[in-house]
């Protein structure tokens, strides 16, 4: 690496060495030169006119072609050709795209170009026609940049080949930089300045000119007269005044802007979009959610935009019960209907160096630029007036000595020198006398010169007074800004909404409608949801070799929680489950249970309900339903089974858990135990407490286990199954089986074994 860095780069001509330097130095200098070129001459705008070089050259070239706002437009290819051939030897497509951007009223707050033909649209800004088809001319707004160009207000520099002159900057009468905004990416830095309203910036300029020492805090205070960025596409700004103040104080930050919408009868109509967001993109994003069944609250979306109404996107909610604000809050959070606009006020100052400006520094430096420009304009005019007065004084000498002047011109070999000596004239005055036409020697011309001389002397006096007074220059600048604001100012398009609710995506339970359903789980792990209450889920058709396992009533906007044989739980919104008209679908297609695990039961209902989870080892606990929710496809651990089986969960909340409910448990040895629910504790996960006594030796041998554990109300009966025909145990018989939790229980005659328990409602 060291040798490579020390390698000499030799620049030779004709075989002889003319320059030599280390490669590392050459590469470093070359990269720095390129970086400075990109920063200063391509990507970043100048504070004075707010333009990048290519934009400045396009506007200047169009003015040279006579394409003013009052003229007839010409082919864009003609303009691009002039720009490339005379001032900007770069790619034609990039130049034309920059030209198009300045003509799009949805990209520029105050467009600089008026285009005829296809110049792109809101939905697709880059859909503009080729430059051979479109025509363009300058907008009236560019008068603010060009009207003072020939008045000594700017320096001129040679073009790239030295054959022409171009202005180093345009003498803008308003701070175009912050009015139209700008974005650019250079080497190691970028700029993002949002557009603003002319009236509001004029208000700030007036305050700053009157009181240059005003604090940054006072200047950036968000009031009715200044409300921050004003985007051409409108929208609603939801950043707080404090956030905006911080952005203008530091020159960096992000602004939140969202679409505007309104209700029309049962529909929601989006009328304005965030800056540089396409309507087609929004429609695609919403339609994609609808297609994926992630947005059931909307049944239809239509694009009713046209030439007169560029943005009109109509959403049709599922019903009148849909909360419009909540739905739009969800769309703000999940689509580009809400956008963060980056702010980085990095630009080239009057010293020719790039830096990040705060709002006061930016406006103050522009005022300094404007002061210099106006001073140069006034001085240029004063020089013109004084030069003309000098000539008029010489002409007056000629008129006062007309006969002698005529004699000298007729008789002398060198009348110019004779006139200078005779009447003490300057060369310019003598040349002006010699260039007089005979027709101008009339008495009437002498009177015209006197009138012109008097007018110019008055103007000279006025100009001199203004140039000597900082106050008068400021007043002149203020009056010009006031007049330009009157000519080009308009109302705000982007409104502020300080009370806007933070956008938040709705979860699937909020998106779904609340309809009663019955969730049915089969032994093979297939699931489906039937509308309404299903009296006999066992009568449904099942796949060959499969059968009914468990079912639970719930609502379509509630989670269905599934528990597998390892004690893990999983949750799916009921509205997304397949219809009961089919065989359903396997849960394994949506969830990832451990290898070898099977699903043992399903739970659904009110998130605050308590359920009894238990295992065949005789242990269990109560858990709140919402504590079982998880978005993980792999689920989460809930009940520890350690070789035991998970039993079908039982609902515990219907009867005022835990005071008025009982737990009924049975083991395979034919024992039944009933105890009060408050003897079991509530847990989030774990093994639980002992419910019923199990012979541990027989359990290990697989000969004894808990077969069922249910929660019953004080007036409910219990169905005890041993085979197909159940035995009913009524509340007045509970006393025979009541005991403390963990006891072995009592036999249920005439059964020698028990298969399962069910609640028999009163």
Image: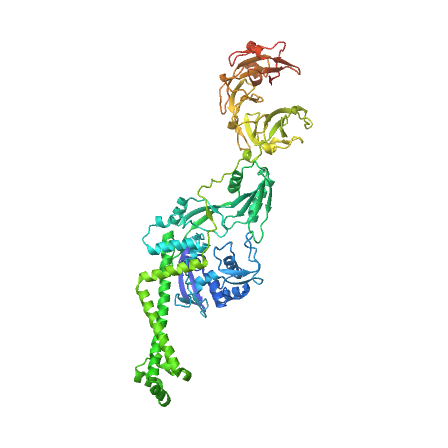
Residue 150 falls in which quadrant of the image? bottom left
Task: Tell how many labels.
Answer: 0
Q: Nearer the viewer, residue 309 or 579?
A: 309
Relative to residue 447, is residue 357 depicted above or below?
A: above
Relative to residue 245, is residue 31 depicted above or below?
A: below
From the top left corner, tell me how far across and down residue 163 is, in percent.
Answer: 45, 70
From the top left corner, tell me how far across and down residue 616 is, in percent.
Answer: 56, 19
Q: In which quarter of the image is the C terminus?
A: top right
Q: Which of 434 and 664 is in front in this view?
A: 434
Q: How was the colour assigned to the protein in this rendering? A: rainbow
Q: Nearer the viewer, residue 702 or 353?
A: 353
Q: Can residue 45 be seen in this view?
A: no
Residue 424 falls in which quadrant of the image? bottom left
Q: Which of 222 and 116 is in front in this view?
A: 222
Relative to residue 670, is residue 535 depicted above or below?
A: below
Q: Which residue is drawn at 34% across and 62% down?
A: 473
From the top left corner, tell me how far across and down residue 369 is, in percent.
Answer: 37, 60
Horizontal side of residue 495 vs 726, given as left or right: left
Residue 545 falls in which quadrant of the image? top right
Q: Can residue 397 be seen in this view?
A: yes
From the top left corner, tell me how far across and down residue 232 is, in percent.
Answer: 49, 52
């Amino acid at each position: 690496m060291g040798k490579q860095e020390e390698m000499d780069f030799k620049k030779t001509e004709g075989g002889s060495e003319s320059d030599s330097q280390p490669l590392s130095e050459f590469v470093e200098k070359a990269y720095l030169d390129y970086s400075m070129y990109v920063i200063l001459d391509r990507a970043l705008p100048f504070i004075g006119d707010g333009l990048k070089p290519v934009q400045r050259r396009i506007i200047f070239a169009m003015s040279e072609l006579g394409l003013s706002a009052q003229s007839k437009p010409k082919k864009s290819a003609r303009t691009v050709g002039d720009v490339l051939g005379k001032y900007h030897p770069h790619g034609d497509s990039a130049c034309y795209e920059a030209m198009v951007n300045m003509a799009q009223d949805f990209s520029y707050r105050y467009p600089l170009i008026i285009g005829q033909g296809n110049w792109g649209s809101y939905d697709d800004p880059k859909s503009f026609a080729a430059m051979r088809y479109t025509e363009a001319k300058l907008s009236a707004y560019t008068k603010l940049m060009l009207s003072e160009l020939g008045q000594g207000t700017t320096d001129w520099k040679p073009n790239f080949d030295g054959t022409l002159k171009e202005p180093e900057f345009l003498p803008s009468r308003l701070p175009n930089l912050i009015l139209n905004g700008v974005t650019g990416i250079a080497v190691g830095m970028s700029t993002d300045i949002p557009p603003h309203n002319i009236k509001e910036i004029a208000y700030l300029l007036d305050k700053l000119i009157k009181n240059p020492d005003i604090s940054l805090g006072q200047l950036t205070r968000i009031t009715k007269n200044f409300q921050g960025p004003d985007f051409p596409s409108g929208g609603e700004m939801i950043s707080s005044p404090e956030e905006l103040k911080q952005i203008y104080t530091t020159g960096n930050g992000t602004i939140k802007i969202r679409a505007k919408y309104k209700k029309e009868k049962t529909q929601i109509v989006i009328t304005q979009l965030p800056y540089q967001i396409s309507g087609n993109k929004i429609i695609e994003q919403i339609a994609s959610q609808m297609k994926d069944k992630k947005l059931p609250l909307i049944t239809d979306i239509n694009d009713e935009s046209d030439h007169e109404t560029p943005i009109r996107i109509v959403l049709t909610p599922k019903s009148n019960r849909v909360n419009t604000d909540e739905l739009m809050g969800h769309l703000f959070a999940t689509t580009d209907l809400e956008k963060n606009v980056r702010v980085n006020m990095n630009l080239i100052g009057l010293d020719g160096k790039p830096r990040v400006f705060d709002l006061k520094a930016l406006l103050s430096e522009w005022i300094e630029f404007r002061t210099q420009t106006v001073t140069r304009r006034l001085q240029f005019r004063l020089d013109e007036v004084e030069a003309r007065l000098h000539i008029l004084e010489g002409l007056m000498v000629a008129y006062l000595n007309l006969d002698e002047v005529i004699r000298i011109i007729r008789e002398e070999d060198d009348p110019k020198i004779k006139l200078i000596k005779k009447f003490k004239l300057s060369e310019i005055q003598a040349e002006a006398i010699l260039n007089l036409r005979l027709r101008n020697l009339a008495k009437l011309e002498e009177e015209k010169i006197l009138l012109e001389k008097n007018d110019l002397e008055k103007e000279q006096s006025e100009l001199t007074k203004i140039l000597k007074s900082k106050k008068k220059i400021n007043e002149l600048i203020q009056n010009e800004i006031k007049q330009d604001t009157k000519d080009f100012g308009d109302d705000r398009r982007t409104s502020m909404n300080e009370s806007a609710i933070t956008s938040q995506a709705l979860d699937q339970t909020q998106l779904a409608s609340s309809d009663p359903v019955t969730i049915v789980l089969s032994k093979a792990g297939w699931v489906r949801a039937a509308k309404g209450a299903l009296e006999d889920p066992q009568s449904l058709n099942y796949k060959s070799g499969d059968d009914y396992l468990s079912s639970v009533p719930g609502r379509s906007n509630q989670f269905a929680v599934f528990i597998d044989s390892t004690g893990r739980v999983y949750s799916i919104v009921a509205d997304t489950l397949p219809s009961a008209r089919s065989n359903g679908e396997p849960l394994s297609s949506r969830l990832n249970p451990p290898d070898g695990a099977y699903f043992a039961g399903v739970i659904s209902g009110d998130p605050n309900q308590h359920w009894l989870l238990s295992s065949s080892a005789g242990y269990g606990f109560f858990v709140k339903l919402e504590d079982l929710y998880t978005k993980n496809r792999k689920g989460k651990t809930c009940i520890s089974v350690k070789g035991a089986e998970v039993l079908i969960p039982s609902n515990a909340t219907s009867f005022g858990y835990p005071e008025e409910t009982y737990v009924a448990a049975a083991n395979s040895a034919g024992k039944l135990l009933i105890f009060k629910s408050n003897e079991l504790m509530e847990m989030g996960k774990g093994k639980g407490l002992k419910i019923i006594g199990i012979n541990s030796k027989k359990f290990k041998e697989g000969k004894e286990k808990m077969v069922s554990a249910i929660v019953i109300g004080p007036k409910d009966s219990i169905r005890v199954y041993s085979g197909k025909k159940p035995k009913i145990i009524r509340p007045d018989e509970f006393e025979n089986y009541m005991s403390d939790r963990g006891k072995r229980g009592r036999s249920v005659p005439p059964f020698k074994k028990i298969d399962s328990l069910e609640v028999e409602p009163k």
